[in-house]
Image (cartoon, rainbow, N blue to C red):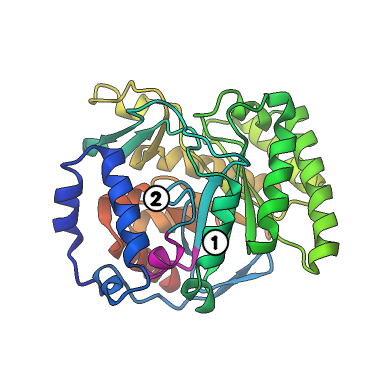
Amino acid sequence: MSLLPYGLARRFLFGLDPEAAHDLTISGLARLQDTPLRCAWSETRVDDPVTVAGLRFPNRIGLAAGLDKNGRCIDALGAMGFGFIEVGTVTPKPQPGNPKPRMFRLPEAEALINRMGFNNDGLAAFVANVQRAKSFRAAGGILGLNIGKNAATPIERAVDDYLIGLDGVALHADYVAVNISSPNTKNLRALQSDEALDALLGALAARRDELARTLGRRVPMFVKIAPDLDEAQVDVVAATLRRHGLDGVIATNTTISREAVQGLRHAEETGGLSGRPVAEASNRVIRRLRAALGAGFPIIGVGGVMDAQDARAKLDAGADLVQIYTGLIYRGSALVGEAARALARR
């Protein structure tokens, strides 16, 4: 059990600018993760092992990409009881992301809007941080590494960036996540269209097979998609995943819809909306994916998981595993164990 009640920490953090609070938290976790002070946020990990995509997950609850873009806090976050952690999105070259301010809280809706724009320190720094992480993986935790393209790379050359990313992280990843669904990099979501997706996944699948021969193991590869796709678009994604032998799908990223938060302060800010308002859109995509992909194809459900009931709803929709992010901001690390216990009982 965490020694620091999150309600106290949240009161302080929510008094700060959202990005300043995020940076302060990440820096603190990075400094303290290998010290006895990690007991301030540590939680006992729920034991509910499940095998998905050939990987043994200690439990079904994971951290979504975006919180720890540079992989600085893997062991600190692992101490919160996650069965798996996904870090990134990392791009080949360092980049500052979009101009500030670029993160906004909508507390009445238990939501966030961000337009960060893949701000990160680049592939070399990311891999170095991943290599320094020890305790989470030594205890059986699964680590996903999430790759994307640089903002300055033309969309017609996007495949080059993803191949560089895959080459850089494959040796160090339990699975690789391919982010083609952030709304905060210009034209990125166009990669979800029929021809562009086919070309990208074909190139990545071929490179994955080449790397398997070099590394002596085949690294599972998941694709992260948006909640704003219609049924026909989801069906295209599903068929393309099957055609290229991808190992799974992550559904979903943030939404550009503002229907659920109209009238709230910051609701019209540009960026991706996460938290409770995206839950049903995410579940809709998961249900359609499961219908299109059939039983057995791995789906990670993410979007709007704020309590145990939301986590169960992801599995009911067809997900095998569940990720959280915004729920962690509003609820703290207690949400990890609460959701994992609910899914274990299920």
Q: Position of residue 46 (x, y in %)?
A: 41, 75
* Amino acid type, mark 1: Val
Please determine whether, in this image, residue 169 is positioned above or below residue 158.
Answer: below
Q: Does residue 280 show up?
A: yes
Determine crowd level at label 2: few under 14, some 14-19, many 20+ residues with C-alpha closer than 10 A.
Answer: many
Give whichever of 341, 124 is nearer the camera: 124
Q: Position of residue 225 (x, y in %)?
A: 59, 39
Name the residue rendered at 26%, 55% in the picture. Answer: 331
Give whichever of 296, 84 is nearer the camera: 84
Choose mark 2 or mark 1, whichever is in front. 1
Q: Which residue has dot 2 on it?
A: 325
* Amino acid type, mark 2: Tyr
Name the residue rendered at 28%, 58% in the picture. Answer: 332
Q: Does residue 110 show up?
A: no
The quadrant of the rendering that contains the N terminus is bottom left
Judge whether residue 317 is colored magenta.
Answer: no
Identify the disc placed on residue 130.
1
Please determine whether, in this image, residue 220 is positioned above or below residue 36.
Answer: above
Judge whether residue 80 is colored magenta.
Answer: yes
Q: Position of residue 15 (x, y in %)?
A: 15, 42
Please determine whether, in this image, residue 318 is positioned above or below residue 132.
Answer: above
Determine crowd level at label 1: few under 14, some 14-19, many 20+ residues with C-alpha closer than 10 A.
Answer: many
Q: Is residue 56 left or right of residue 6?
A: right
Q: Is residue 325 left or right of residue 248?
A: left
Which region is colored magenta?
A: 73-84
Q: Earlier in the sequence, mark 2 or mark 1?
A: 1
Name the residue rendered at 37%, 60% in the picture. Answer: 30
Please determine whether, in this image, residue 51 is positioned above or below residue 64.
Answer: below
